[in-house]
Image (cartoon, rainbow, N blue to C red):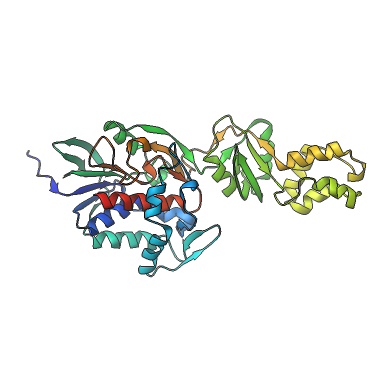
């Protein structure tokens, strides 16, 4: 049976997530005929669960130094040309109420569904042909056209945009399809790994699992990188914003350091010995930390008695340990609990201005599929918007 002629599109966008919808909408509004293909039954599923259902849609502090990549400069061009203020203006044009939470993080007052509805409205404005529940069966390239078979339909266009994300949160339908497609076209892939993910502990460090549910503000460190936010002890190890942030930099076998008392001066115990010699380390820790955590740390340090009766060298050692308590995670909770994927399609093979593959004209990659990973707190959405904008201007 003869196949029907492919639809006459200017661009095919694979993946109706944040980056894919944004790119398709903007290109469509520039007069391009765009097909947006999504293998899931509905668009924007990761958007819907983000920010506790309120979508932390950008961060006012977004800048190139808040992103990980083998090329730390790659993201700067797109981020400078489509800013958080640009996306915020779009949000406000759609009458979506928002608020700033902390550290520049912007959230919807209502529901993340408002962001999905906004993007769909923008796609409709650009007359984008959206196909959901369309599993991709084949992608090919020849005679200047990319050909996609999806959902039993054939598509063809001179441009193809890979916006299918990474494998983080597989229950949302996330896969490594973007990497397979990139390799098919000769693009390199930086080894993907879970990022913004809880870390797990075992062995002697497993005793901290008894603190499951305890949270406190800390400074978490990995190498030269540090974040001051809350850490949360879990039944499997460590989580909370500070740990999720540091997890993106951590590598298996490395240690992380935790400063449990980030507001204390370096010699706070020696000062306490002079001012309150009859105080105990347990009491001081209980004054500063959740009781269960204070008692666990006290038991680990093992300094009994009044401070006045303890040698300075022992107090100095305790200060140092509390300021840089070392853990060696045995792993992470993997893609199932990771908010994003680090690694991905190599930036060495892409134009930082247009997101187009250097050696495959008409092929683009945007969003989480690319080796650009932002900090926690709306940074990855801003990369999605900015990279989508950059590609849309070139389509």
Of all residues shown, which one is farthest toward the left? Answer: 2
- Residue drawn 55% across the image and 57% down it: 103
Report the residue that reaches farthest toward the bottom. Answer: 95
Q: Residue at x 68, y 42 (%)?
A: 210
Residue at (47% x, 61% y) in the render: 107
Q: Position of residue 76 (x, y in %)?
A: 41, 48
Q: Residue 86: in sight, yes or no?
A: yes
Q: Position of residue 56 (x, y in %)?
A: 47, 57
Find residue 23 and report its horizontal and vertical position in percent: 30, 52
306 sits left or right of 88 in the view: right
Residue 371 vertical placement versus 395 (above, below): above
Which quadrant holds the N terminus?
A: top left
Of the pair 29 and 198, the residue shown nearer to us: 29
Total marks in image: 0
The percent coordinates of residue 153 (x first, y second) are: 17, 45
Q: Is residue 303 above or below residue 386?
A: above
Whether residue 240 is visible, yes or no, is no
């Amino acid at each position: 049976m003869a196949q029907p002629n492919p639809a006459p599109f200017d661009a095919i966008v694979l993946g109706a997530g944040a980056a894919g919808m944004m790119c398709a909408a903007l290109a469509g509004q520039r007069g391009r005929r765009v097909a947006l293909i999504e293998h899931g039954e509905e668009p924007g599923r990761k958007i819907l669960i983000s920010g506790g259902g309120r979508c932390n849609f950008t961060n006012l502090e977004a800048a190139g130094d808040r992103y990980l990549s083998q090329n730390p400069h790659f993201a700067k061009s797109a981020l400078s040309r489509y800013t958080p203020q640009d996306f915020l203006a779009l949000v406000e044009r759609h009458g979506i109420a928002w608020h700033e939470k902390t550290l520049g993080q912007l959230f919807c007052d209502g529901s993340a569904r408002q962001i999905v509805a906004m993007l769909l409205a923008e796609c409709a404005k650009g007359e984008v042909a959206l196909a959901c529940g369309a599993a991709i069966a084949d992608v090919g390239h020849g005679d200047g056209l990319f050909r996609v078979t999806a959902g039993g339909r054939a598509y063809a266009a001179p441009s193809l945009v890979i916006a299918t994300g990474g494998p983080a949160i597989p229950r949302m339908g996330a896969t490594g399809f973007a990497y397979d497609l990139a390799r098919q076209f000769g693009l390199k892939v930086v080894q993907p790994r879970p990022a913004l993910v809880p870390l797990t502990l075992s062995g002697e460090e497993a005793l901290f699992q008894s603190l499951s549910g305890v949270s406190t503000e800390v400074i978490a460190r990995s190498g030269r990188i540090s974040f001051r936010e809350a850490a949360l002890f879990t039944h499997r190890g460590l989580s909370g914003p500070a740990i999720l942030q540091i997890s993106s930099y951590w590598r298996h076998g490395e240690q992380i350091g935790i400063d449990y008392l980030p507001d204390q001066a370096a010699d706070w115990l020696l000062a306490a010995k002079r001012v309150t010699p009859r105080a105990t380390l347990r009491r001081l820790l209980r004054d500063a930390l959740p009781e269960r955590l204070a008692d666990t740390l006290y038991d680990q340090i093992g300094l009994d008695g009044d401070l006045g009766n303890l040698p300075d060298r022992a107090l100095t050692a305790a200060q140092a340990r509390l300021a840089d308590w070392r853990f060696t995670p045995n792993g992470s909770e993997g893609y199932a609990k990771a908010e994003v994927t680090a690694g991905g399609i190599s930036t060495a093979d892409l134009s930082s201005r247009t997101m187009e593959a250097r050696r495959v004209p008409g092929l683009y990659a945007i969003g989480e599929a690319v080796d650009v990973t932002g900090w926690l707190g709306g940074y990855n959405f801003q990369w999605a918007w900015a990279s989508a904008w950059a590609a849309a201007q070139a389509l």
